[in-house]
Amino acid sequence: MMKLTKLITCLLLPISPLLAQQRTGRVFEDQNANNQFEQNEKQLADIVVSDGYDVVKTDNTGTYTLPHNPKARFLSVTIPSGYKATKTHYIPLRGEVKNLDFALTKDTVQQADFLRFIQITDTETPLYGPWIDNVRNYAHQQKASLIMHTGDICYEPGMLFHAKQVNSELMGRPTYYTVGNHDLVKGEYGEKLFEDLFGPTYYSFDAGPAHFVVTPMPNGDYKPSYTADQIISWLKKDLAAMDKSKPLIFINHDFFAGPDFILKGEKEQIDLTQYNLKAWFYGHWHNNFVFKQKGVYVVCSNAPNKGGIDNSAAQFVVVDIDKQGIKGIQPVYTNLRDHVQLVQPTADQQVTSKEALPVVVSAYDSERKIQSVAMEIYAHESGKRLSSVQLSPSGDWLWQANIPFGKQKGQYDALITIQYENGEQALKRQSFNLVDRAENDMKLQWSTAVKGNIWKTSPLIVGDKLFVATMDDGTGTNHAITALDKRTGKMLWSLPTVNSIKHKLRYSDGILLASDVETNVYAIDANTGKIRWTKKPSNPALPTFVSGPALEQGVYYSGLGKRMSAIDIKTGKVLWEGVDPSGGEATPAELSVVDQTLLAGYNWNALCAYDTGTGKLLWKRQEDGLRFRSGGVTAKDGYLYTTGLNGLFKLNLKTGEVAQKSIKTDDFKVMASPGIVEDLLVMPTSTNGIKAYDLQTLTEKWHFVTGEALVYTSPYSSPDQHKPVGTVESSVTEVKGKLFFGASDGYIYVLNKQGKLLSKFNLGAPIFSEITADGDFIYTADFVGNVSCFKL
């Protein structure tokens, strides 16, 4: 008996260490979704499982075996297409873990050849905001299969909040997270809290026709335990196991692969283009920037709950993928529900008997897609229905039609019906008058919808033409430079551009000049729309170029830092290129030339002055909030007037020395430059409309309050604080002794010089660009791409 016991002991000795060196489990279809394997449930073969170091596949019994790696902290399963995790896609390995099975359930939302997913990023908040409901409801309404947060959940409070409120269970769709720089926090190692709340920092999954890979930010506020070599070594194994016919979608908090899409560590590197790479999604920069290189979409989005650092609109991104790759990219602006506004006919519509009645409606919803817009017209007195019409879409927000209508003078009621794709409806009733002659201060003459959105590009009037440029923060099919007849709004020509143009156009001697967000420069024959010359960068780069270029004495100034250049507009010859400093964020502030000095801002860095002839840096200022460069400068009598974070400044043009400053409680992070109107300095604000200050003392003289922003653009402005956000991004234009400006609430305002309201007009869409005056007419361009002409 003793000999038998010794024999059994000997036999067991080599087995225990062997078992300790392996981890074994199953991947199965959890038919009743109880997260427990039962005998009748199907075990899934050929499914990838990893511990972050080794990658294996389940055998034909659905079983996997991984070597025991003491450094591994998680097991994760690459969820196959058509499935979702019953609980999570990972199993923590801390402590004694007995059950290493992965339970998967069928995902009925997914399709084999099509996938819709939502990207959110940089929410940085512990507060519940309307964006959460928008994302959840949009995902449900539009059948999005998953939600991807690309990082900067932000410090302990934000991470704890998101883990409780923005998770797969409450959002109703699998919700994944990426590590951002502000998600590496104090602890045993930088990613410890992230792992406790969200699981591994790098992993993969399949969904629809695509393979997704999620990797962490290389560095951040606290040092992570992972290394680039460690991640690349795992990535090679993961991609070796993927189906090479699937599009590869790469997810990280930042874009750092460079133009060749090669990831590099100290010893390891991998070329992602060898694995059918189709897109790289990221955040970090708080801006909206999409470009395409080597057939790969590189997509940055701003946060859904606040304005971007470069005043990009708050949004989430909806992405459609098919077997070939990216099929569609669409930004969705948050916090709008049943937004409906009759733009035309106006309250007092002047018409002639020869023309049809033009109808323009602005309509938008952050959660539901609009299927159709219809309008019925009723006689105001009798209530008799006189006409009805279906409107046609002219962009994300705009719907238009011409109604054959007996236009006798009188008051009428318009009933607008919005039909959503989910079967719901919204109704809005508005009244208008048909008159022989409108008596209001601004009489709408025409409005024309151009394809794409319009950000800071004011209408430019040259002779009988109006020029405007558009942007497209989605797939990139609607950015162009367009010429209209200024009298009728009729399109004369349109020239597609490589990428979005977000700021002002310039003109001189028959040449129209523009710069897009990649710093492509276009010199165009203003009459024909034909390109005379272009200047192209070697590759798209961050930060984006969203500033207004400058033009002075036949020289065009464009770009920032190492990409800034002075160009002869006749020949396209670069006179000088590349200046200091480098770094900082994109700024929507205009470049300005004053007395042979070029003024340029670098957001979160400095306001700089350069010699226009050489590009030599003359001075820079960054103290007292001057490093926050959202807005531009205005010159008078050898001084510059500008704003910083919350201060007004008067600077010496030649030296940059601060001659006067006044620190306020106002937030001046808007795209506007100060306006000088006689003895007043008129300045828009991020949250409080327009304020006017004494030009000599910088003390407040009056304050005009606007309405709540329809779209949030000013950096970090947000409805989550439950405080009014009356943003004005447009500088004030003085016309015939009156002050004109557009606001983010959708109105054009007209004030007198004492700040009293004279009139206003609701365009139903945010207005970020300046109003352009030309004789007795003013021209506006709103965010949704509607260009309008008013007679004063």
Image (cartoon, rainbow, N blue to C red):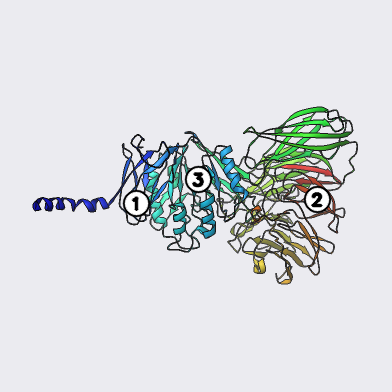
Identify residue type, mark 1. Val
10 Å crowding of disc 1: few (<14), some (14-19), many (20+): few
Identify residue type, mark 3. Ser
Camera-nearest residue between 732 and 384: 384
Camera-nearest residue between 318 and 524: 318
Pinpoint residue 770: horizontal percent, then vertical percent: 76, 51
Whichever of labels 2 and 3 marks the residue nearer the N terminus, that label is 3
The tag on residue 97 is 1
User: Mark 2 to mark 3: distance in Å?
Assistant: 44 Å
10 Å crowding of disc 3: few (<14), some (14-19), many (20+): some
In the rendered structure, the answer to whether residue 570 lies left or right of residue 435 reads: left
Q: Which residue is mark 2?
A: 749
In the rendered structure, the answer to whether residue 102 lies left or right of residue 420 reads: left
In the rendered structure, the answer to whether residue 137 lies left or right of residue 749 reads: left
The tag on residue 57 is none
Helix, strand, or loop for circle 2?
Answer: strand
Identify residue type, mark 2. Tyr
- Vertical comparison of 361 with 222: above or below: above
Camera sees residue 161: yes
The tag on residue 168 is 3
Whichever of labels 1 and 2 marks the residue nearer the N terminus, that label is 1
Q: Are marks 1 and 2 in contact (CB under 8 Å)?
A: no
Helix, strand, or loop for circle 3?
Answer: helix
